[in-house]
Amino acid sequence: MIVSCGEALIDMVPLHGADGETGYRPLPGGSPFNVAIALARLGSRTGFLSRVSTDFFGDLLVRTLEANAVDTGLVVRGPEPSTLAFVSIAAGEEPQYAFFNIGAADRSLVAADLPEPLPDAVDCLHFGSFSLAVEPAATTLAELMRRETGHRVISLDPNVRPTLVGEREAYVRRLERLVALATVVKVSAADLEWLYPGASAEAIAVRWRDSGPALIAVTRGTDGAVALTGTTRAAVPGNRVDVVDTVGAGDTFQAGLLARLAEFGRLGRDSVSTLTEAELADALSFAGRAAAITCSRAGADPPRRAELR
């Protein structure tokens, strides 16, 4: 089972009425939450680990997980409010977010909320986005990652939210320590540009790979994706699609990559490191097609496995 760990929140997505006025539609979201939903829809056995509010938004989040066959046995409920993320979407640009999460449930995850040991069925843990930067969740999840490194596959997608991660250099140092613990890392070229302004994305990917991970994948939007192991490099082009918005596209790519590796029986540190170029390109292509379908729909609405056949 692949367990996604981190924030679960409500995306307040713009909705334009017939009268021309703009309102907001509440949709379940959060990067690790989206990864869990996408994995389940793609046919992977999936769980979610987080602290989720007992408010009505939290109820919506849990119902959504359960409706998509995501195991919620590692979800802890708490009285803190749900995080709200207001989304601004402009044609041809990355979505912009305004987060309201002070004292929220998902950032309030503490060590006492974690089972020890994890269930034996957990083969892979996925981490990502701002839950790795806001306390106390950041310390809790970093310790979980350290504890499980070497015992399970560790997946990481920084999915940087600049308004939440604090001072850039301090965040980069923290992130690099986490990258060194991971097995599979996916990062967007846009995130790398924010983390290391002016640096070559592929050069940074090589440096990150050499620090510990078995696989680094860099997504490049309409230009496709490239991935590196210690011995192999593969690149795939982008997919043409009528874009509604890109909310959840990177999360779907991450889920697609993990799901395809699992389908191959290659979601293990040793097996990831020995992927052939053809296998790596296939996994990237699969993930890219899944992400493209998400872009063709409003909000984080990843495809089901049958849609990729």
Image (cartoon, rainbow, N blue to C red):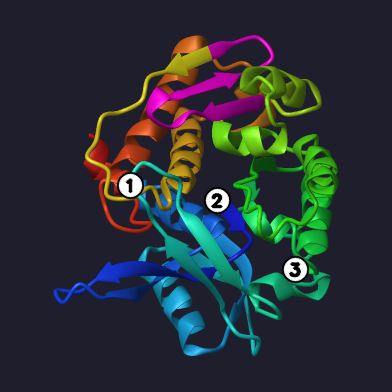
The answer to whether any part of residue 16 appears in the image is yes
Q: Which residue is mark 3?
A: 114
- Asked whether, in this view, residue 155 is left or right of residue 180, the answer is left
Q: Residues within 10 Å of mark 2 (few under 14, many from 20)?
A: some
Query: Given this view, does label 1 or label 2 mark the residue nearer the observer?
Result: 1
Identify which residue is drawn at 63% across, 68% down.
50
Q: Residues within 10 Å of mark 3 (few under 14, many from 20)?
A: some
Q: Residue 275 appears at what percent x and percent y?
A: 56, 17
Q: Where is 79 relative to 113, above or below?
A: below
Residue 1 marker? 2
Q: Where is 254 relative to 23, above or below?
A: above
Q: Tell me the element at label 1.
A: loop
Q: Nearer the viewer, residue 137 or 114?
A: 137
Identify which residue is drawn at 22% across, 34% down.
309
Identify which residue is drawn at 41% across, 23% down.
223
Q: Are marks 3 and 2 in contact (CB under 8 Å)?
A: no
Q: Nearer the viewer, residue 222 or 207?
A: 222
Q: Amino acid at mark 1?
A: Ala
- Asked whether, in this view, residue 259 is left or right of residue 274, the answer is left
Q: What are the residue bounds of the magenta stretch?
A: 215-233
Q: Which residue is mark 1?
A: 91
